[in-house]
């Protein structure tokens, strides 16, 4: 073999070796290209697929295009990451097949060498997020049987104490107290009825009322407002607390057309807070009316009986006058009339005593009313901005803002000086 030919087949010694890029350089350039193409967040429409709720709180899913496919006929997929820091306020649950709009930043996930959408916001397509969350929770709780009539507790016909779980600042509490006053003992558990933490406060008040047996019937509710204002009564903690309550619960939220999850789970739904109070008072009024009718019926029956007996005795007297001396007959007639008068006097005396007793009870109930306490010169002090009721001076510090509720109006002031008082032996559960 010719040595020169063999030499010609070998690479030239001075040939230039190509320069190789590192993986990091390639990934960085790809990321720069993508982020240059998508410099700001964009809305992306698609169908959810492979939704996974990670234990870290992150949500991972894919957006699938319903129309387009790749050159191999496969549906186009965009991986998405919805991190915990921005998904905490999501009202509804992400499920496969749901059509959504996602706002996010197109970027890359270098560790796996793929592009992705870092999601900032998710909205359901064609329906509001709150409405979707409402329907999802309603469907789930209904499947668990929480709306079944068989599990609901009857409202007792003669409750002694009524518990009101609502806001002290709304008109609902004044409407309910004015209707219930004079008929029941009223226990008020003040809570927030809208905003962050409202659902947890309502659920906590329900659990507290059950744990301490504070009432025979509980009313939870608030006046009307927007869907957002009443959303606390659509949250799962409130529904669960109503379901596990041993005390019957009446839901009275908003107006006639306002339906919440609490309405479906509660033992009884009232169209408004005022109607809830009217329902309870109506039963009491019906009972009182029926009692008066029975008393009058008893009086009429006894009067008829006495009249009948009197007529019978008069007839016997006529017969006895033919057989006995006249003075003996007159003595029996006189005695009969005395017994009749005595019986009537006793009945009237008993009824008068019962009426005075009922009036006394009504007066005591009125004296126990929270509104009556305010009208006698007392006040309620709330610490701002949380509006917590101040029960001890140790809860306040100089400079704190406080609000004082009076029988007429309220006063907002600032604390300039706090005088502490040593703890004393409690006189009772409310001391």
Image (cartoon, rainbow, N blue to C red):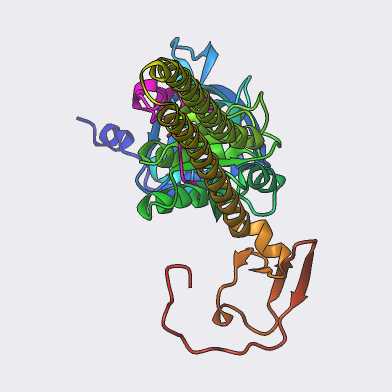
Taking depth in this image into account, of 99 and 360 the one nearest to the observer is 360
Taking depth in this image into account, of 175 and 368 the one nearest to the observer is 368
Residue 227 visible to the viewer: yes
Numbered disc total: 0
Name the residue at 64% across, 47% down.
177
Taking depth in this image into account, of 254 and 181 the one nearest to the observer is 181
Tell me if residue 377 comes above or below residue 337 in the rendering: below
Q: Position of residue 316 (x, y in %)?
A: 40, 17
Name the residue at 45% across, 48% down.
215
Q: Position of residue 379 (x, y in %)?
A: 69, 69
Residue 119 visible to the viewer: no
Tell me if residue 191 comes above or below residue 302 in the rendering: below
Q: Position of residue 413 (x, y in %)?
A: 77, 75
The quarter holding residue 208 reads: bottom left
> From the viewer's perspective, is 99 left or right of 385?
left
Name the residue at 64% across, 63% down.
387
> From the viewer's perspective, is 127 left or right of 158?
right
Tell me if residue 217 comes above or below residue 301 in the rendering: below
| Magenta region includes residue 335 | no
Give the position of the N terminus as an image quadrant: top left
Q: Position of residue 321 (x, y in %)?
A: 42, 19
Q: Residue furthest left?
A: 1
The quarter holding residue 36 reads: top right
What segment is highlighted magenta in the picture?
133-161
């Amino acid at each position: 073999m010719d040595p020169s030919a063999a030499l010609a087949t070998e690479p030239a010694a001075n040939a230039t070796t190509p320069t190789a890029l590192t993986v990091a350089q390639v990934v960085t350039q790809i990321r720069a290209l993508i982020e240059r193409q998508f410099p700001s967040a964009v809305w992306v429409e698609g169908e959810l697929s492979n939704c996974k709720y990670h234990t870290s709180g992150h949500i991972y899913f894919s957006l699938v295009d319903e129309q387009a496919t790749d050159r191999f006929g496969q549906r186009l997929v965009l991986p998405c990451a919805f991190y915990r820091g921005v998904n905490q306020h999501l009202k509804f649950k992400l499920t496969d097949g749901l059509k959504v709009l996602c706002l996010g930043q197109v970027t890359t996930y270098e560790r796996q060498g793929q592009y992705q959408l870092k999601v900032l916001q998710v909205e359901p397509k064609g329906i509001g997020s709150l409405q979707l969350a409402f329907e999802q929770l309603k469907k789930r709780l209904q499947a668990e049987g929480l709306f079944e009539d068989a599990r609901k507790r009857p409202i007792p016909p003669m409750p002694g104490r009524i518990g009101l779980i609502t806001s002290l600042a709304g008109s609902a509490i004044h409407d309910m107290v004015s209707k219930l006053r004079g008929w029941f003992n009223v226990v008020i558990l003040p809570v927030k009825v809208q905003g962050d933490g409202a659902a947890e406060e309502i659920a906590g008040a329900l659990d507290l009322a059950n744990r301490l047996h504070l009432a025979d019937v509980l009313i939870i509710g608030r006046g009307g407002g927007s869907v957002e204002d009443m959303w606390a009564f659509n949250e799962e903690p409130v529904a669960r607390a109503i379901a596990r309550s041993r005390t019957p619960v009446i839901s009275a939220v908003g107006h006639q057309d306002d339906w919440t999850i609490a309405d479906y789970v509660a033992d009884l739904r009232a169209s408004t807070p005022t109607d809830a109070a009217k329902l309870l008072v109506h039963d009491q009024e019906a009972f009182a009316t029926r009692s008066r009718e029975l008393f009058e019926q008893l009086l009429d029956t006894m009067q008829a009986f006495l009249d009948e007996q009197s007529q019978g005795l008069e007839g016997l007297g006529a017969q006895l006058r033919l057989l006995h001396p006249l003075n003996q007959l007159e003595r029996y007639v006189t005695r009969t009339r005395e017994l009749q008068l005595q019986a009537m006097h006793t009945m009237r005396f008993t009824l008068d005593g019962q009426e005075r007793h009922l009036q006394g009870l009504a007066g005591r109930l009125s004296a126990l009313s929270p509104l009556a306490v305010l009208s006698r010169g007392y006040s309620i002090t709330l610490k701002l901005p949380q509006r917590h009721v101040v029960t001890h001076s140790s809860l306040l510090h100089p400079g704190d803002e406080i609000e004082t509720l009076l029988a007429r109006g309220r006063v907002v002031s600032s604390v300039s000086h706090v005088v502490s008082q040593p703890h004393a032996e409690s006189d009772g559960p409310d001391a």
